[in-house]
């Protein structure tokens, strides 16, 4: 196509490569962020999976592409932190470190806002640590003034980072994180989002990073003989109960249910369906 023909086909002078450029910019910033952060602090891939799953199953009037891209870049402002700060749980920070921590959404905003086509993404990054009651940062806005996409990202970031030990000094168990989210509904989190968010995370377990589509996430009531455990199962106290690869039979399922009845929280099992050989047996 010569230049004249192109101009006739594109009379408004629209940059037809802009979507590709946007994706390339987001991907480049995302990869730089991953390279800078230590492995224990790379929560972004899990956060992205949670955000995508929530948007897929919870109808919302948001720009899904902007929210997804913001979930990839929310931690961009952390790249200027020292290695020591990166390794400290958020709730244990004091004075200057805490001030620096509370500025990371603004730092990320300032980087992304200057890039073409990413102003909406930058706004979501800026507000993703605001709280429903106005006690968040950096601007202390509250309620409906917080963009809906930022509210989803806030829930997703906390859900993942509590489990990774990035907020408290200890890693918080998955079921306990659900309890914390419920506890802070209407204070930190949009109360209308909390229940559907938890339901979606329990149903689809996007935070577990299951790449294998054959793996099922089940409770003990839905496990059937012949199914094979796809990931080690631990008790609430951290004791290994079953190794990956263990094949369930009726006796083992009943024994597992008895153990579970003595636990504070139900088990979440990652299993593979029964094979044809197991069915025939």
Image: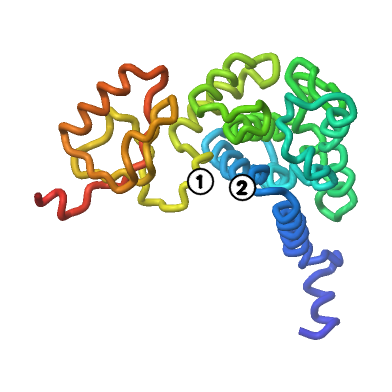
Residue, disc 2: 45
Circle 1 — which element?
A: loop
Residue lying furthest left:
281
Residue, disc 1: 209
- Whole-percent x and y of residue 12? 85, 64
**How far is the residue under mark 2 from the one under mark 1?**
8 Å
Left or right side of 93 for 247:
left
Q: Are the residues flagged by discs 2 and 1 in contact, CB closer than 8 Å? A: yes
| Viewer-side residue, 255 vs 105 | 255
Can the viewer see residue 120?
A: no
Left or right side of 234 for 197:
right
Q: Residue at x 72, y 54 (%)?
A: 30
> Badge 1: few (under 14), some or many (20 or more) residues near its Cα, within 10 Å?
few
Q: Residue at x 82, y 53 (%)?
A: 117
Q: Is residue 180 above or below residue 68?
A: above
- Whole-percent x and y of residue 199? 48, 27
- Whole-percent x and y of residue 217? 38, 38
Residue lying furthest bottom:
2
- Whole-percent x and y of residue 187? 70, 14
Can the viewer see residue 172?
A: yes
> Badge 2: few (under 14), some or many (20 or more) residues near its Cα, within 10 Å?
some
Colour convention of the picture: rainbow
Circle 2 — which element?
A: helix
| Sequence-first tag of 2 and 1 | 2
């Amino acid at each position: 196509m010569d230049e004249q023909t192109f101009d006739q086909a594109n009379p408004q002078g629209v940059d037809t490569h802009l979507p590709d450029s946007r994706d390339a910019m987001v991907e480049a910033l995302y990869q730089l962020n991953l390279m800078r952060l230590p492995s224990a602090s790379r929560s972004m891939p899990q956060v992205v999976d949670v955000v995508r799953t929530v948007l897929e199953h919870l109808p919302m009037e948001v720009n899904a592409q902007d929210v997804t891209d913001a979930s990839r870049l929310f931690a961009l402002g952390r790249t200027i932190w020292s290695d020591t700060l990166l390794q400290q749980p958020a709730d244990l920070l004091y004075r200057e470190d805490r001030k620096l921590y509370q500025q990371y959404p603004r730092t990320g905003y300032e980087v992304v806002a200057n890039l073409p086509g990413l102003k909406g993404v930058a706004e979501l990054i800026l507000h993703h640590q605001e709280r429903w009651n106005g006690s968040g940062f950096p601007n202390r806005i509250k309620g409906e003034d917080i963009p809906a996409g930022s509210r989803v990202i806030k829930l997703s970031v906390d859900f993942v980072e509590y489990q990774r030990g990035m907020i408290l000094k200890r890693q918080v168990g998955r079921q306990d994180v659900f309890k914390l989210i419920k506890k802070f509904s209407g204070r930190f989190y949009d109360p209308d989002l909390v229940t559907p968010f938890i339901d979606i995370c329990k149903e689809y377990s996007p935070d577990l990073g299951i790449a294998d589509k054959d793996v099922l996430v089940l409770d003990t009531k839905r496990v059937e003989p012949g199914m094979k455990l796809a990931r080690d199962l631990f008790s609430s106290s951290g004791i290994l109960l079953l190794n990956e690869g263990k094949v369930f039979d009726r006796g083992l399922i009943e024994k597992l249910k008895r153990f579970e009845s003595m636990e504070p929280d139900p088990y979440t099992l990652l299993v593979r369906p029964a094979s044809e050989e197991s069915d025939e047996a």
